[in-house]
Image (cartoon, coloured by chain):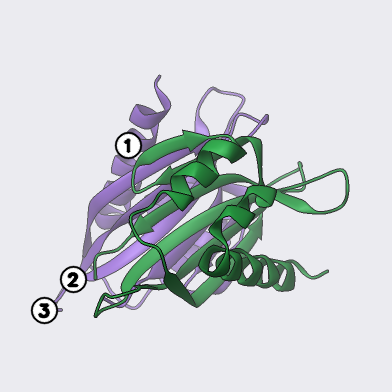
Chain colours: A green, B purple
Amino acid sequence: MDPDALAKAFVQHYYSTFDANRAGLANLYQDSSMLTFEGQKTQGAQNIVAKLTGLPFQQCLHSIQTVDCQPSGPGGGMLVFVSGQIQLAGEQHALKFSQMFHLMPTPQGSFYVQNDIFRLNYA
Amino acid sequence: MDPDALAKAFVQHYYSTFDANRAGLANLYQDSSMLTFEGQKTQGAQNIVAKLTGLPFQQCLHSIQTVDCQPSGPGGGMLVFVSGQIQLAGEQHALKFSQMFHLMPTPQGSFYVQNDIFRLNYA
């Protein structure tokens, strides 16, 4: 699969899961995975999903503006860089965000999220 | 050196070099380095610096708002995620941007930029 198509498919899957069933994101992380969310660091699939499901909003809708990707090196990883907007339920204005993922291959031929860094841009 | 301190030092060095002497950034890239600048892909130190020095503005000033970093995996690399503003000479408003770097260690104990993805956020 072409890397750009793979990155877009991942991004589509990630944010639709986030918006519909945040707990379902657990499948995308492993124990070594790291999340930095607005400067707060979390490690491990379970802690990361606890962080994401505990965010102080129930419903949200991501819309993606750009997706860039590059191979990260000899380990077969892929860097995915996203910009977009997140609309929180009950809020008038959407918030701009940017986020990067470092995807690493699994033995099963799939990918998991090794690194995840998220920032709001406060537009 | 503590990774957060190293990331901040790199970011300081990168943007002060960009603002004062863009051609001097050549030292930070290698032949394998990749840049995606607003969706346009470039590879190799020489091509990357040609791209950066050829951007349609002469003077600019970056100001950094956030710097996040995480180790990228067993190769000893480091992911650095930056958000900030860039003020172009002669323009009234600064532009928001976000950028990610994947730094890899050199045999000399320094780091070079293996991956670089830049996006304006059009605030």
Q: Quadrant of the C terminus of chain B?
A: bottom left
User: On the picture, is B112 further left or further right than B44?
Assistant: left
Q: Which residue is mark 1?
A: B8
Q: Residues within 10 Å of mark 1 (few under 14, many from 20)?
A: some
* Chain ID, mark 2: B
Q: Residues within 10 Å of mark 3 (few under 14, many from 20)?
A: few
Label 1 – label 2 distance at C-alpha = 22 Å
Task: Using the rendered image of the protein, determine whether residue A27 is visible from the camera's viewpoint.
Answer: yes
Say what amino acid the circle numbered 1 marks: Lys
* Chain ID, mark 1: B
Q: Position of residue A95 (x, y in %)?
A: 31, 71
Give the residue drawn at x 42%, y 69%: A59
- Local secondary structure at mark 2: loop
Q: Which residue is mark 3?
A: B92
User: On the picture, is A56 further left or further right than A107?
Assistant: left
Task: Using the rendered image of the protein, determine whether residue B33 is visible from the camera's viewpoint.
Answer: no
- Local secondary structure at mark 1: helix
Q: Which residue is mark 2?
A: B94
Ranked by sequence position, the earlier of labels 1 and 2 is 1
Give the residue drawn at x 43%, y 43%: A36
